[in-house]
């Protein structure tokens, strides 16, 4: 037991500095991008309400999607010629994902609802004020709770006048990862369905009650949007309110119980 812990500690100490290197992160991002493109080009695609995407792809707009539903949206954005920035975590994993998104044409705004929130809001408003750039973000990221819309996207919309556009996808050959966000990996030779919702506007003078109603309505729509797509392929429903740190703690506890039973 002690030897295993020592080995994991040494292994972690060896890899963490390497994973923090920008060059190495670009290599990993490239290795991730290849299977994403392969899955996309070997699959049948159906996108509903694509007209809304084309209308706002080069305008100030906030495209929102659940944290676990980003994989197949990247090539759609890239091939659709969208001009946008993506909100990314400051953590090394977030920086690596930002590099992956850069390969699909998305620039990065670093921060989250937990850290760097003010700077993200300031930078996001600057991007939207350009008049021909949008923002892509996960309203339940980077650590949950899952399928809960936090306020960030709504503040962008309220202060800029830009619409919020909810997007989701599902597929016939899917791998739902054992993570808090149940990240959906589309496998090659799938049928991919993507839905683009109608624009949602937040009035600049919206009261707290109006703001909360818009947030709740958007959250309910996005949950329904995803569940209807998943139901087409018989995928099990993704849970709400899963939290990254709590989910990891529960996994550790489950492992301890399993070892104790042996």
Image (cartoon, grey):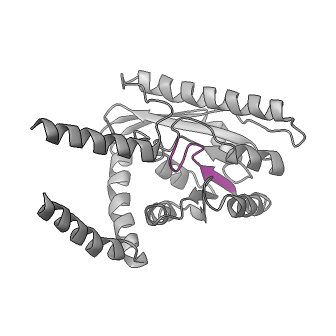
149 left or right of 91 in image:
right
In the image, taking residue 2 as reference, residue 214 lies left or right, namely right
Does the magenta run of residues contain 136?
yes
Q: Horizontal and vertical percent for residue 92?
A: 45, 66
Q: Foreground: 188 or 153?
A: 153
Residue at (80%, 60%) from the top-left corner? 129
Span highlighted in magenta in the image: 134-144
Closer to us: 97 or 211: 211
Give the main secondary structure of the magenta stretch. loop
Quadrant placement of the N terminus: bottom left
Q: x, y percentage for residue 7? A: 17, 67
Give the image quarter of residue 23: bottom left
Q: Is 70 situated above or below 130?
A: above
Whether residue 51 can be seen here: yes
**Could you say which quadrant of the image residue 110 lies in?**
bottom right
Q: Quadrant of the C terminus?
A: top left
What residue appears at the point 54 percent right and 35 percent down from the top-left corner? 147
Identity of the residue drawn at 81% across and 45% down: 158
Along the viewing direction, whichever of 137 and 8 lies nearer the viewer: 8
Question: Please, is residue 237 above or below residue 83 in the view?
Answer: above
Residue 2 location, x and y as percent? 14, 62
């Amino acid at each position: 037991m002690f030897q295993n812990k020592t080995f994991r500690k040494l292994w972690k100490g060896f890899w963490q500095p390497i994973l923090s290197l920008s060059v190495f992160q670009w290599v990993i991002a490239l290795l991730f991008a290849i299977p994403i493109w392969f899955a996309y080009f070997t699959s049948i695609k159906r996108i509903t309400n694509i007209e809304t995407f084309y209308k706002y792809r080069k305008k100030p707009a906030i495209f929102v999607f659940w944290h676990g539903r980003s994989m197949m949206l990247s090539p759609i954005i890239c091939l659709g010629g969208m001009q946008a920035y993506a909100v990314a975590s400051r953590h090394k994993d977030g920086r690596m994902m930002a590099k992956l998104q850069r390969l699909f044409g998305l620039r990065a705004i670093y921060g989250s609802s937990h850290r760097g929130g003010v700077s993200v809001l300031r930078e996001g408003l600057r991007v939207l004020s350009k008049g021909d750039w949008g923002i892509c973000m996960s309203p339940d990221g980077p650590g949950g709770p899952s399928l809960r819309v936090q306020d960030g996207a709504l503040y962008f919309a309220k202060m800029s006048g830009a619409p919020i556009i909810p997007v989701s996808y599902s597929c016939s050959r899917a791998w739902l990862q054992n993570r808090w966000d149940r990240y959906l990996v589309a496998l090659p030779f799938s049928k991919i369905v993507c839905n683009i919702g109608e624009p949602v506007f937040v009035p600049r003078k919206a009261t707290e009650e109006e703001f909360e109603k818009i947030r709740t309505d958007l959250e309910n729509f996005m949950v329904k949007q995803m569940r209807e797509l998943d139901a087409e392929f018989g995928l099990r429903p993704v849970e709400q309110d899963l939290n990254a740190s709590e989910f990891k703690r529960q996994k550790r506890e489950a492992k301890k119980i399993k070892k104790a039973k042996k």
